[in-house]
Image (spheres, rainbow, N blue to C red):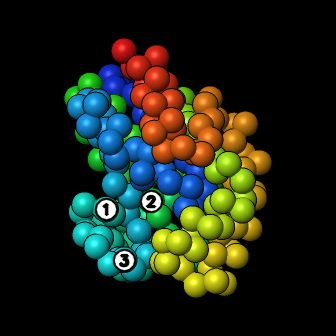
């Protein structure tokens, strides 16, 4: 794959499962109309309240395999027993029109994207693993075994935060959003 040529920028936002990436991002996007969230494709089942094409592009294993075979992904990875991937066409269309593509991915996906371009990279960290465990438990979407698995992965992901240009500790949601806005203003305006 050749490096991406673009007018807009790629912004990568990563952090452990349950850290609140979506909560930090959502209201910030409203302030930056030129930033578009790149929806990931996933083989994970839909959760209650999620919609295909709004939250993710939900794919069967066979559909995901076909996307891999057709070289449709900028990156894809196995995450928590499912596959997730960023579709090249979505990102390229956004950045070639001068807009910016925000990609919410895990640390292994970031490492793959970094091979093709130099994105603005932001890591969202929890104040502690205990707080992260509480958040995962409170959202009631995973079993205790799954929570333990996600916390084990989070420990490894936290070691990767120095690979990112910026780190935001999500202790207070409003403060984390303020910091993200400041980073985006600095990088994009």
Q: Where residue 116 appears, x then y in whole percent? A: 53, 37
Asked whether residue 172 appears in the rendered view, the answer is yes
Res 60 → quadrant: bottom left
Counting other residues with Cα less than 10 Å from the Cα at mark 2, is it few (<14), some (14-19), or many (20 or more)?
many
Q: Mark 3 points at which residue?
A: 47
Q: In the rendering, which numbered label is found on residue 84?
A: none
Whole-number angstrom distance, CA of label 3 to CA of label 2: 18 Å
Above or below: residue 13 compared with residue 152: above
Q: Name the residue under label 1.
A: 55
Secondary structure beneath dot 3 equals loop
Left/right placement of residue 36 relative to residue 74 reads: left
Pair 3/2: label in front: 3
Q: In the rendering, which numbered label is found on residue 85?
A: 2
3 or 1: tag closer to the N-terminus: 3
Above or below: residue 68 compared with residue 181: below
Asked whether residue 74 appears in the rendered view, the answer is no
Nearest the camera: 34 or 93? 34
Secondary structure beneath dot 2 equals strand
Q: Residue at x 69, y 37 (%)?
A: 163
Whole-number angstrom distance, CA of label 3 to CA of label 1: 10 Å
Counting other residues with Cα less than 10 Å from the Cα at mark 3, is it few (<14), some (14-19), or many (20 or more)?
few
Report the number of numbered marks: 3
């Amino acid at each position: 794959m050749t490096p991406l040529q673009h007018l807009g920028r790629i912004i990568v936002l990563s952090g452990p499962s349950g850290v609140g990436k979506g909560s930090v991002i959502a209201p910030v996007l409203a302030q930056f109309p030129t930033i578009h969230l790149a929806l990931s494709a996933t083989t994970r089942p839909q959760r209650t309240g999620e919609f295909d094409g709004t939250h993710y592009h939900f794919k069967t294993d066979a559909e995901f395999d076909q996307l891999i075979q057709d070289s449709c992904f900028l990156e894809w990875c196995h995450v928590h027993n499912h596959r997730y991937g960023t579709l090249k066409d979505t990102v390229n269309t956004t950045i070639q029109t001068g807009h910016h593509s925000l990609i919410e991915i895990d640390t292994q996906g970031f490492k793959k994207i970094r091979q093709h371009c130099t994105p603005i990279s932001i890591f969202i960290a929890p104040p502690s693993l205990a707080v992260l465990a509480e958040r995962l438990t409170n959202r009631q979407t995973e079993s205790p075994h799954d929570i333990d698995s996600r916390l084990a992965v989070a420990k490894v992901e936290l070691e990767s935060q120095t690979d990112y240009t910026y780190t935001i500790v999500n202790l207070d949601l409003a403060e984390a959003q303020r910091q993200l806005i400041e980073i985006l203003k600095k990088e994009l305006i």
